[in-house]
Image (cartoon, rainbow, N blue to C red):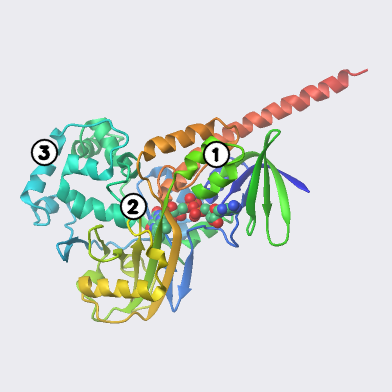
Amino acid sequence: MILHRDVVIIGGGISGLSCAWWLARKGIRTTILEQADRTGGLIHSTRKDGYVTDHAASMILNFNARVSQFIEQSGLQQHRIERNNISRRYILKGDALKQVPESLRGLLFSDLFSLKTRLQLLTEPFRSRTNSDSESVADFIRRRLGQEILDLAIDPYVSAVLASDPEQACARSVLPRLTALERQFGSISAGILLKKLIPGKRGLAQQAFSFNGGMRTLTEVLAENPLCEIQTSQQVMALEPARNGWRISSHSDTREQQILARQLILSTPAPVAARLLKPLQPELSRLLEQIRYAPIAQIHLGFDQAGLSPVMQGNGFLLPSSAKTPLRGSLFISNLIDQRAPAGKLLSSHFIGGAKQPDALLQSDDQLLDQTLAALNKLCGLKQNPEMTRINRHAQGLPLYHGRYHQLTQAIQQTAMTTNGLHLVANYLQGISIRDRILQASQVADQVSLQLSGQLSAASSHSLSLTQSCIKQP
Ligand SMILES: Cc1cc2nc3c(=O)[nH]c(=O)nc-3n(C[C@H](O)[C@H](O)[C@H](O)COP(=O)(O)OP(=O)(O)OC[C@H]3O[C@@H](n4cnc5c(N)ncnc54)[C@H](O)[C@@H]3O)c2cc1C
Protein backbone atom coordinates (compact mmCIF):
# COMPACT_ATOMS: atom_id res chain seq x y z
CA MET A 1 0.00 0.00 0.00
CA ILE A 2 1.22 3.50 -0.79
CA LEU A 3 0.46 6.25 1.72
CA HIS A 4 0.01 9.88 0.65
CA ARG A 5 1.26 12.71 2.87
CA ASP A 6 1.83 16.45 2.38
CA VAL A 7 5.06 16.68 4.41
CA VAL A 8 7.40 13.89 5.52
CA ILE A 9 10.32 14.52 7.87
CA ILE A 10 13.10 11.92 8.01
CA GLY A 11 14.71 11.96 11.47
CA GLY A 12 13.04 12.68 14.80
CA GLY A 13 15.81 14.58 16.60
CA ILE A 14 15.34 18.14 17.85
CA SER A 15 15.73 19.50 14.28
CA GLY A 16 12.94 17.33 12.87
CA LEU A 17 10.63 17.71 15.87
CA SER A 18 11.05 21.52 15.92
CA CYS A 19 10.28 21.68 12.21
CA ALA A 20 7.08 19.67 12.77
CA TRP A 21 6.13 22.05 15.59
CA TRP A 22 6.62 25.21 13.49
CA LEU A 23 4.63 23.61 10.64
CA ALA A 24 1.81 22.65 13.03
CA ARG A 25 1.59 26.33 14.03
CA LYS A 26 0.72 27.00 10.39
CA GLY A 27 -1.88 24.23 10.46
CA ILE A 28 0.29 21.86 8.38
CA ARG A 29 0.28 18.13 9.16
CA THR A 30 3.56 16.21 9.09
CA THR A 31 4.79 12.62 9.35
CA ILE A 32 8.12 11.89 11.04
CA LEU A 33 9.95 8.67 10.14
CA GLU A 34 12.52 7.82 12.82
CA GLN A 35 14.76 4.76 12.68
CA ALA A 36 15.25 4.46 16.47
CA ASP A 37 12.58 3.19 18.84
CA ARG A 38 12.24 6.67 20.38
CA THR A 39 12.36 10.26 19.18
CA GLY A 40 14.97 12.76 20.41
CA GLY A 41 18.04 11.62 18.44
CA LEU A 42 21.13 12.75 20.36
CA ILE A 43 18.90 14.18 23.09
CA HIS A 44 17.91 11.71 25.77
CA SER A 45 18.07 11.44 29.58
CA THR A 46 18.33 8.50 31.95
CA ARG A 47 17.70 8.22 35.69
CA LYS A 48 20.24 6.07 37.57
CA ASP A 49 20.63 5.79 41.37
CA GLY A 50 18.75 9.10 41.82
CA TYR A 51 20.96 10.94 39.26
CA VAL A 52 19.42 12.32 36.04
CA THR A 53 22.03 12.19 33.27
CA ASP A 54 21.65 13.70 29.80
CA HIS A 55 23.08 11.66 26.92
CA ALA A 56 24.21 14.73 24.96
CA ALA A 57 22.89 18.28 25.47
CA SER A 58 22.29 19.30 29.06
CA MET A 59 21.22 22.93 28.67
CA ILE A 60 19.84 25.50 26.26
CA LEU A 61 21.63 28.83 26.03
CA ASN A 62 19.32 31.38 24.49
CA PHE A 63 19.34 35.05 23.57
CA ASN A 64 16.78 34.90 20.77
CA ALA A 65 13.16 36.02 21.13
CA ARG A 66 11.91 33.46 18.59
CA VAL A 67 13.32 30.60 20.67
CA SER A 68 11.65 32.05 23.79
CA GLN A 69 8.36 32.13 21.85
CA PHE A 70 8.87 28.48 20.86
CA ILE A 71 9.47 27.42 24.49
CA GLU A 72 6.46 29.38 25.76
CA GLN A 73 3.98 28.31 23.10
CA SER A 74 4.98 24.65 22.86
CA GLY A 75 4.04 23.93 26.47
CA LEU A 76 7.67 23.59 27.56
CA GLN A 77 7.63 26.66 29.79
CA GLN A 78 6.00 24.78 32.68
CA HIS A 79 8.80 22.15 32.63
CA ARG A 80 11.62 24.68 32.47
CA ILE A 81 14.34 24.84 35.19
CA GLU A 82 16.54 27.94 35.15
CA ARG A 83 20.26 27.50 35.58
CA ASN A 84 21.41 28.43 39.09
CA ASN A 85 23.02 31.79 39.41
CA ILE A 86 26.50 30.62 40.34
CA SER A 87 29.33 31.92 38.25
CA ARG A 88 32.57 30.15 39.07
CA ARG A 89 34.15 29.10 35.80
CA TYR A 90 37.74 27.98 35.53
CA ILE A 91 40.32 27.82 32.78
CA LEU A 92 43.72 26.18 32.75
CA LYS A 93 46.74 28.47 33.01
CA GLY A 94 50.05 26.63 33.18
CA ASP A 95 49.24 23.52 35.21
CA ALA A 96 46.54 25.03 37.43
CA LEU A 97 42.88 25.97 37.08
CA LYS A 98 42.22 29.71 37.56
CA GLN A 99 38.83 31.30 38.17
CA VAL A 100 37.63 33.52 35.30
CA PRO A 101 36.52 37.02 36.46
CA GLU A 102 32.80 37.61 35.85
CA SER A 103 32.97 41.07 34.29
CA LEU A 104 35.05 42.52 31.45
CA ARG A 105 36.39 45.07 33.95
CA GLY A 106 37.40 42.24 36.28
CA LEU A 107 39.07 40.50 33.36
CA LEU A 108 41.05 43.59 32.38
CA PHE A 109 42.33 44.07 35.93
CA SER A 110 43.00 40.38 36.73
CA ASP A 111 46.38 38.72 36.31
CA LEU A 112 44.82 36.02 34.15
CA PHE A 113 46.08 37.72 30.99
CA SER A 114 49.42 39.47 30.53
CA LEU A 115 49.59 43.27 30.29
CA LYS A 116 50.36 42.89 26.56
CA THR A 117 47.10 40.98 26.00
CA ARG A 118 45.08 43.47 28.04
CA LEU A 119 46.48 46.34 25.97
CA GLN A 120 45.74 44.34 22.82
CA LEU A 121 42.10 44.08 23.94
CA LEU A 122 41.90 47.85 24.35
CA THR A 123 43.40 48.48 20.91
CA GLU A 124 41.29 45.83 19.14
CA PRO A 125 39.07 48.42 17.35
CA PHE A 126 42.12 49.72 15.50
CA ARG A 127 43.13 46.39 13.91
CA SER A 128 42.62 45.95 10.18
CA ARG A 129 39.73 43.79 9.06
CA THR A 130 39.50 41.03 6.48
CA ASN A 131 36.70 39.82 4.25
CA SER A 132 38.01 36.26 4.05
CA ASP A 133 35.28 33.61 4.35
CA SER A 134 37.77 30.83 4.97
CA GLU A 135 39.90 32.25 7.81
CA SER A 136 40.37 29.76 10.67
CA VAL A 137 39.17 30.49 14.20
CA ALA A 138 42.80 30.54 15.38
CA ASP A 139 43.87 33.08 12.72
CA PHE A 140 40.82 35.29 13.35
CA ILE A 141 41.36 35.41 17.13
CA ARG A 142 45.15 35.85 16.85
CA ARG A 143 44.60 38.76 14.44
CA ARG A 144 41.97 40.54 16.51
CA LEU A 145 42.62 39.56 20.15
CA GLY A 146 46.06 37.93 20.33
CA GLN A 147 47.61 34.51 20.96
CA GLU A 148 46.94 34.46 24.70
CA ILE A 149 43.17 34.94 24.31
CA LEU A 150 43.24 32.14 21.74
CA ASP A 151 45.17 29.79 24.04
CA LEU A 152 43.34 30.50 27.30
CA ALA A 153 39.77 31.29 26.23
CA ILE A 154 38.87 30.39 22.63
CA ASP A 155 40.82 27.15 22.13
CA PRO A 156 39.21 25.55 25.24
CA TYR A 157 35.72 26.58 24.03
CA VAL A 158 36.27 25.32 20.48
CA SER A 159 38.05 22.11 21.59
CA ALA A 160 35.75 21.20 24.48
CA VAL A 161 32.29 22.55 23.62
CA LEU A 162 32.44 22.09 19.84
CA ALA A 163 34.82 19.08 19.84
CA SER A 164 36.70 20.91 17.10
CA ASP A 165 40.20 22.21 16.35
CA PRO A 166 40.65 26.02 16.28
CA GLU A 167 43.42 25.79 13.64
CA GLN A 168 41.04 24.03 11.24
CA ALA A 169 37.63 25.39 12.28
CA CYS A 170 36.10 28.01 9.95
CA ALA A 171 35.76 31.29 11.90
CA ARG A 172 32.70 32.47 9.98
CA SER A 173 30.79 29.21 10.70
CA VAL A 174 31.97 28.61 14.28
CA LEU A 175 31.97 32.20 15.58
CA PRO A 176 29.20 33.70 13.43
CA ARG A 177 28.34 36.53 15.81
CA LEU A 178 31.94 37.66 16.44
CA THR A 179 32.86 37.57 12.76
CA ALA A 180 29.64 39.45 11.89
CA LEU A 181 30.64 42.20 14.36
CA GLU A 182 33.91 42.65 12.49
CA ARG A 183 32.12 42.73 9.13
CA GLN A 184 29.42 45.16 10.32
CA PHE A 185 31.34 47.44 12.69
CA GLY A 186 34.99 46.84 11.81
CA SER A 187 35.73 45.58 15.33
CA ILE A 188 34.44 43.09 17.90
CA SER A 189 34.56 45.41 20.92
CA ALA A 190 33.18 48.46 19.05
CA GLY A 191 30.40 46.22 17.69
CA ILE A 192 29.45 44.95 21.16
CA LEU A 193 29.40 48.51 22.52
CA LEU A 194 27.40 49.93 19.61
CA LYS A 195 24.87 47.10 19.80
CA LYS A 196 24.28 48.01 23.44
CA LEU A 197 23.76 51.67 22.55
CA ILE A 198 21.65 51.37 19.38
CA PRO A 199 17.94 51.05 20.29
CA GLY A 200 16.42 47.83 18.96
CA LYS A 201 19.84 46.21 18.39
CA ARG A 202 20.23 44.88 21.93
CA GLY A 203 19.29 41.18 22.02
CA LEU A 204 17.54 39.28 24.78
CA ALA A 205 19.61 38.90 27.98
CA GLN A 206 21.19 35.44 27.83
CA GLN A 207 19.14 32.70 29.45
CA ALA A 208 20.38 29.23 30.35
CA PHE A 209 17.90 26.51 31.25
CA SER A 210 16.98 22.87 31.17
CA PHE A 211 13.80 20.92 31.97
CA ASN A 212 12.36 18.80 34.79
CA GLY A 213 13.33 15.20 34.16
CA GLY A 214 16.26 16.19 31.92
CA MET A 215 16.52 17.31 28.32
CA ARG A 216 14.41 14.37 27.12
CA THR A 217 11.39 16.40 28.32
CA LEU A 218 12.12 18.85 25.49
CA THR A 219 11.77 16.25 22.77
CA GLU A 220 8.99 14.30 24.54
CA VAL A 221 6.78 17.40 24.78
CA LEU A 222 7.43 18.22 21.10
CA ALA A 223 6.53 14.63 20.17
CA GLU A 224 3.02 15.21 21.59
CA ASN A 225 2.29 17.51 18.60
CA PRO A 226 -1.28 16.56 17.53
CA LEU A 227 -0.63 17.48 13.87
CA CYS A 228 2.41 15.19 13.67
CA GLU A 229 2.20 11.45 13.03
CA ILE A 230 5.36 9.86 14.44
CA GLN A 231 6.52 6.48 13.20
CA THR A 232 9.45 5.17 15.24
CA SER A 233 11.57 2.09 14.36
CA GLN A 234 11.02 3.10 10.72
CA GLN A 235 14.29 3.37 8.81
CA VAL A 236 14.24 5.20 5.51
CA MET A 237 16.16 3.20 2.91
CA ALA A 238 15.58 5.00 -0.39
CA LEU A 239 14.18 8.14 -2.01
CA GLU A 240 12.89 8.61 -5.54
CA PRO A 241 11.43 11.63 -7.26
CA ALA A 242 7.74 11.12 -7.98
CA ARG A 243 5.09 13.18 -9.79
CA ASN A 244 4.44 16.12 -7.49
CA GLY A 245 7.01 15.16 -4.86
CA TRP A 246 8.89 12.21 -3.46
CA ARG A 247 8.51 8.48 -3.00
CA ILE A 248 9.99 7.43 0.36
CA SER A 249 10.71 3.76 1.04
CA SER A 250 11.21 2.70 4.63
CA HIS A 251 11.01 -0.43 6.71
CA SER A 252 10.64 -1.59 10.29
CA ASP A 253 11.11 -5.13 11.69
CA THR A 254 7.57 -5.98 10.75
CA ARG A 255 6.67 -4.02 7.64
CA GLU A 256 7.86 -2.17 4.57
CA GLN A 257 6.09 0.94 3.42
CA GLN A 258 6.11 3.59 0.74
CA ILE A 259 4.93 7.15 1.16
CA LEU A 260 4.31 9.70 -1.58
CA ALA A 261 5.03 13.13 -0.09
CA ARG A 262 4.75 16.58 -1.65
CA GLN A 263 7.47 18.05 0.60
CA LEU A 264 10.45 16.18 2.04
CA ILE A 265 12.54 17.37 5.00
CA LEU A 266 15.82 15.52 5.57
CA SER A 267 16.77 15.86 9.20
CA THR A 268 19.40 13.13 9.55
CA PRO A 269 23.18 13.42 10.00
CA ALA A 270 25.00 14.39 6.78
CA PRO A 271 26.32 10.88 5.87
CA VAL A 272 22.75 9.48 5.86
CA ALA A 273 21.47 12.40 3.77
CA ALA A 274 24.42 11.89 1.36
CA ARG A 275 23.61 8.17 0.99
CA LEU A 276 19.87 8.71 0.43
CA LEU A 277 20.45 11.49 -2.13
CA LYS A 278 23.30 9.81 -4.04
CA PRO A 279 21.22 8.24 -6.86
CA LEU A 280 19.09 11.35 -7.44
CA GLN A 281 21.30 14.31 -6.52
CA PRO A 282 24.94 13.18 -6.96
CA GLU A 283 26.31 16.73 -6.67
CA LEU A 284 24.47 17.45 -3.41
CA SER A 285 25.47 14.02 -2.12
CA ARG A 286 29.14 14.74 -2.95
CA LEU A 287 29.00 18.02 -0.99
CA LEU A 288 27.35 16.33 2.02
CA GLU A 289 30.00 13.59 1.99
CA GLN A 290 32.63 16.23 2.75
CA ILE A 291 31.22 16.84 6.24
CA ARG A 292 33.25 15.10 8.94
CA TYR A 293 32.18 14.34 12.50
CA ALA A 294 34.10 14.11 15.78
CA PRO A 295 33.64 11.28 18.28
CA ILE A 296 32.74 12.25 21.86
CA ALA A 297 32.58 10.23 25.07
CA GLN A 298 30.58 11.74 27.88
CA ILE A 299 31.47 10.37 31.31
CA HIS A 300 28.88 11.08 34.03
CA LEU A 301 30.07 10.65 37.59
CA GLY A 302 28.24 10.99 40.93
CA PHE A 303 30.17 11.99 44.06
CA ASP A 304 29.51 12.70 47.70
CA GLN A 305 29.74 16.49 48.08
CA ALA A 306 31.56 16.23 51.40
CA GLY A 307 35.20 17.17 51.02
CA LEU A 308 35.03 18.30 47.37
CA SER A 309 37.36 21.17 46.44
CA PRO A 310 36.01 24.71 45.66
CA VAL A 311 36.54 24.04 41.92
CA MET A 312 34.09 21.14 42.09
CA GLN A 313 31.56 23.43 43.77
CA GLY A 314 31.60 25.74 40.72
CA ASN A 315 30.25 25.57 37.15
CA GLY A 316 33.06 23.55 35.61
CA PHE A 317 36.13 24.06 33.47
CA LEU A 318 37.31 23.80 29.89
CA LEU A 319 40.79 22.66 28.88
CA PRO A 320 42.80 23.79 25.84
CA SER A 321 43.81 21.23 23.25
CA SER A 322 47.41 21.57 24.48
CA ALA A 323 46.50 20.26 27.99
CA LYS A 324 48.38 17.09 28.91
CA THR A 325 45.24 15.03 29.52
CA PRO A 326 42.64 13.56 27.17
CA LEU A 327 39.92 15.28 29.24
CA ARG A 328 38.54 18.29 27.30
CA GLY A 329 36.21 19.75 29.90
CA SER A 330 33.96 19.11 32.90
CA LEU A 331 30.58 20.45 33.95
CA PHE A 332 29.41 20.20 37.55
CA ILE A 333 25.83 19.74 36.43
CA SER A 334 23.95 19.52 39.73
CA ASN A 335 25.55 22.82 40.88
CA LEU A 336 24.02 24.41 37.78
CA ILE A 337 20.66 22.65 37.56
CA ASP A 338 18.54 21.54 40.51
CA GLN A 339 17.03 18.04 40.75
CA ARG A 340 19.86 16.31 38.90
CA ALA A 341 21.45 14.53 41.93
CA PRO A 342 20.27 13.21 45.31
CA ALA A 343 20.69 15.62 48.27
CA GLY A 344 24.33 16.01 49.32
CA LYS A 345 25.64 14.55 46.02
CA LEU A 346 27.28 16.06 42.92
CA LEU A 347 26.49 15.03 39.35
CA SER A 348 29.41 15.87 37.05
CA SER A 349 29.80 15.37 33.27
CA HIS A 350 33.19 15.04 31.59
CA PHE A 351 34.10 15.05 27.90
CA ILE A 352 36.83 13.11 26.09
CA GLY A 353 37.27 13.05 22.32
CA GLY A 354 36.88 15.64 19.59
CA ALA A 355 38.73 16.37 16.35
CA LYS A 356 42.16 15.94 17.89
CA GLN A 357 41.33 12.58 19.52
CA PRO A 358 39.76 10.61 16.66
CA ASP A 359 40.49 7.29 18.42
CA ALA A 360 38.94 8.31 21.77
CA LEU A 361 36.09 5.80 21.50
CA LEU A 362 38.44 2.87 20.91
CA GLN A 363 39.13 2.91 24.64
CA SER A 364 37.24 0.76 27.12
CA ASP A 365 34.90 2.29 29.71
CA ASP A 366 37.50 1.54 32.42
CA GLN A 367 40.18 3.45 30.50
CA LEU A 368 37.88 6.47 29.97
CA LEU A 369 36.99 6.42 33.67
CA ASP A 370 40.64 6.14 34.76
CA GLN A 371 41.67 9.08 32.53
CA THR A 372 38.84 11.23 33.90
CA LEU A 373 39.60 10.43 37.54
CA ALA A 374 43.35 11.03 37.03
CA ALA A 375 42.63 14.49 35.54
CA LEU A 376 40.15 15.37 38.34
CA ASN A 377 42.69 14.27 40.92
CA LYS A 378 45.42 16.44 39.39
CA LEU A 379 43.31 19.51 38.64
CA CYS A 380 40.74 19.50 41.47
CA GLY A 381 42.44 17.40 44.15
CA LEU A 382 39.69 14.75 43.94
CA LYS A 383 40.36 11.87 46.31
CA GLN A 384 37.10 9.84 46.27
CA ASN A 385 35.81 7.25 43.82
CA PRO A 386 32.47 7.92 42.09
CA GLU A 387 29.38 6.24 43.54
CA MET A 388 27.65 6.44 40.13
CA THR A 389 29.20 6.07 36.67
CA ARG A 390 27.50 6.25 33.31
CA ILE A 391 29.23 6.61 29.95
CA ASN A 392 27.62 7.72 26.68
CA ARG A 393 29.53 7.26 23.45
CA HIS A 394 28.77 9.24 20.28
CA ALA A 395 30.74 7.96 17.29
CA GLN A 396 29.43 10.89 15.21
CA GLY A 397 29.11 13.35 18.09
CA LEU A 398 29.27 16.70 16.35
CA PRO A 399 29.89 17.86 12.77
CA LEU A 400 33.23 19.60 12.38
CA TYR A 401 32.87 23.01 10.81
CA HIS A 402 36.36 22.69 9.32
CA GLY A 403 38.12 24.22 6.32
CA ARG A 404 36.05 26.26 3.86
CA TYR A 405 32.90 25.30 5.72
CA HIS A 406 31.02 28.53 5.05
CA GLN A 407 31.37 28.03 1.28
CA LEU A 408 30.55 24.32 1.61
CA THR A 409 27.28 24.93 3.47
CA GLN A 410 26.32 27.72 1.07
CA ALA A 411 26.85 25.33 -1.85
CA ILE A 412 24.79 22.64 -0.05
CA GLN A 413 21.92 25.01 0.61
CA GLN A 414 21.94 26.47 -2.91
CA THR A 415 22.01 23.01 -4.51
CA ALA A 416 19.19 21.78 -2.25
CA MET A 417 17.12 24.86 -3.12
CA THR A 418 17.20 23.99 -6.82
CA THR A 419 15.24 20.82 -6.01
CA ASN A 420 11.63 21.72 -5.42
CA GLY A 421 10.20 20.04 -2.34
CA LEU A 422 13.55 19.08 -0.75
CA HIS A 423 14.72 20.71 2.50
CA LEU A 424 17.65 20.04 4.83
CA VAL A 425 17.47 20.83 8.54
CA ALA A 426 20.25 19.44 10.71
CA ASN A 427 23.15 20.45 12.91
CA TYR A 428 25.67 20.47 10.05
CA LEU A 429 23.93 23.65 8.82
CA GLN A 430 23.64 26.95 10.74
CA GLY A 431 24.90 25.84 14.15
CA ILE A 432 24.98 22.80 16.40
CA SER A 433 23.20 24.23 19.46
CA ILE A 434 19.59 23.48 20.26
CA ARG A 435 18.86 27.20 19.92
CA ASP A 436 20.23 27.12 16.36
CA ARG A 437 18.28 23.94 15.60
CA ILE A 438 14.98 25.59 16.64
CA LEU A 439 15.78 28.71 14.59
CA GLN A 440 16.79 26.84 11.42
CA ALA A 441 13.68 24.65 11.74
CA SER A 442 11.54 27.80 11.82
CA GLN A 443 13.11 29.09 8.56
CA VAL A 444 12.69 25.72 6.85
CA ALA A 445 9.04 25.54 8.00
CA ASP A 446 8.43 28.89 6.25
CA GLN A 447 9.92 27.55 2.98
CA VAL A 448 7.95 24.29 3.20
CA SER A 449 4.70 26.13 3.85
CA LEU A 450 5.28 28.44 0.86
CA GLN A 451 6.12 25.60 -1.55
CA LEU A 452 3.29 23.42 -0.27
CA SER A 453 0.67 26.11 -0.72
CA GLY A 454 1.97 26.61 -4.30
CA GLN A 455 1.66 22.86 -4.96
CA LEU A 456 -1.80 22.65 -3.40
CA SER A 457 -3.18 25.62 -5.32
CA ALA A 458 -1.67 24.24 -8.58
CA ALA A 459 -3.29 20.87 -7.80
CA SER A 460 -6.68 22.43 -7.04
CA SER A 461 -6.67 24.59 -10.21
CA HIS A 462 -5.65 21.47 -12.19
CA SER A 463 -8.57 19.48 -10.74
CA LEU A 464 -10.90 22.47 -11.26
CA SER A 465 -9.92 22.65 -14.96
CA LEU A 466 -10.35 18.87 -15.24
CA THR A 467 -13.83 19.16 -13.69
CA GLN A 468 -14.68 22.04 -16.03
CA SER A 469 -13.47 20.12 -19.09
CA CYS A 470 -15.52 17.11 -17.94
CA ILE A 471 -18.62 19.30 -17.54
CA LYS A 472 -18.08 20.68 -21.05
CA GLN A 473 -18.01 17.15 -22.49
CA PRO A 474 -21.25 16.42 -24.40
C1 LIG B 1 27.97 15.29 23.91
C2 LIG B 1 27.13 16.41 23.38
C3 LIG B 1 26.75 17.46 24.21
C4 LIG B 1 25.96 18.50 23.72
N1 LIG B 1 25.58 19.51 24.57
C5 LIG B 1 24.77 20.51 24.11
C6 LIG B 1 24.25 21.48 25.01
O1 LIG B 1 24.48 21.43 26.23
N2 LIG B 1 23.44 22.45 24.50
C7 LIG B 1 23.12 22.51 23.17
O2 LIG B 1 22.42 23.45 22.76
N3 LIG B 1 23.56 21.56 22.30
C8 LIG B 1 24.36 20.57 22.74
N4 LIG B 1 24.78 19.58 21.88
C9 LIG B 1 24.37 19.63 20.45
C10 LIG B 1 22.93 19.14 20.21
O3 LIG B 1 22.59 18.15 21.16
C11 LIG B 1 22.82 18.52 18.81
O4 LIG B 1 23.40 19.37 17.84
C12 LIG B 1 21.35 18.29 18.43
O5 LIG B 1 20.70 17.52 19.41
C13 LIG B 1 21.28 17.59 17.06
O6 LIG B 1 19.93 17.39 16.73
P1 LIG B 1 19.49 16.92 15.27
O7 LIG B 1 18.04 16.71 15.31
O8 LIG B 1 20.03 17.87 14.25
O9 LIG B 1 20.26 15.54 15.02
P2 LIG B 1 20.07 14.12 15.73
O10 LIG B 1 19.75 14.31 17.16
O11 LIG B 1 21.29 13.34 15.37
O12 LIG B 1 18.78 13.49 15.02
C14 LIG B 1 18.85 12.85 13.77
C15 LIG B 1 17.82 11.72 13.78
O13 LIG B 1 17.78 11.09 12.50
C16 LIG B 1 17.52 9.71 12.70
N5 LIG B 1 17.90 8.97 11.49
C17 LIG B 1 19.14 8.81 10.96
N6 LIG B 1 19.07 8.05 9.84
C18 LIG B 1 17.76 7.75 9.63
C19 LIG B 1 17.05 7.00 8.63
N7 LIG B 1 17.67 6.41 7.57
N8 LIG B 1 15.70 6.88 8.75
C20 LIG B 1 15.03 7.46 9.79
N9 LIG B 1 15.67 8.17 10.77
C21 LIG B 1 17.00 8.32 10.68
C22 LIG B 1 18.42 9.38 13.92
O14 LIG B 1 18.04 8.17 14.52
C23 LIG B 1 18.17 10.62 14.79
O15 LIG B 1 17.08 10.43 15.67
C24 LIG B 1 25.55 18.51 22.35
C25 LIG B 1 25.93 17.44 21.51
C26 LIG B 1 26.70 16.40 22.01
C27 LIG B 1 27.07 15.25 21.12
Mark 3 sits on what residue?
Answer: 123
Q: Position of residue 316 (x, y in %)?
A: 27, 64
**What type is the residue that disc 1 sits on?**
His
Single out the residue that lies furthest toward the left: 115
In percent of width and height, residue 85 lies at 28, 61
On screen, residue 176 versus residue 232, left or right, reads left
Q: Which disc number belongs to residue 423?
A: 1
Q: CA distance from mark 2 to mark 1?
A: 26 Å
Nearer to us: label 2 or label 3: 2
Secondary structure under tag 2 reads loop
Between discs 3 and 1, the one toward the N terminus: 3
Check disc 3 and give the amino acid type.
Thr
Q: Is residue 14 visible?
A: no
To which quarter of the image does residue 51 belong?
A: bottom left
What residue lies at 11% left-to-right and 43% top-to-bottom? 120
Say above or below: 27 vs 184: below
Q: Secondary structure at mark 1?
A: strand
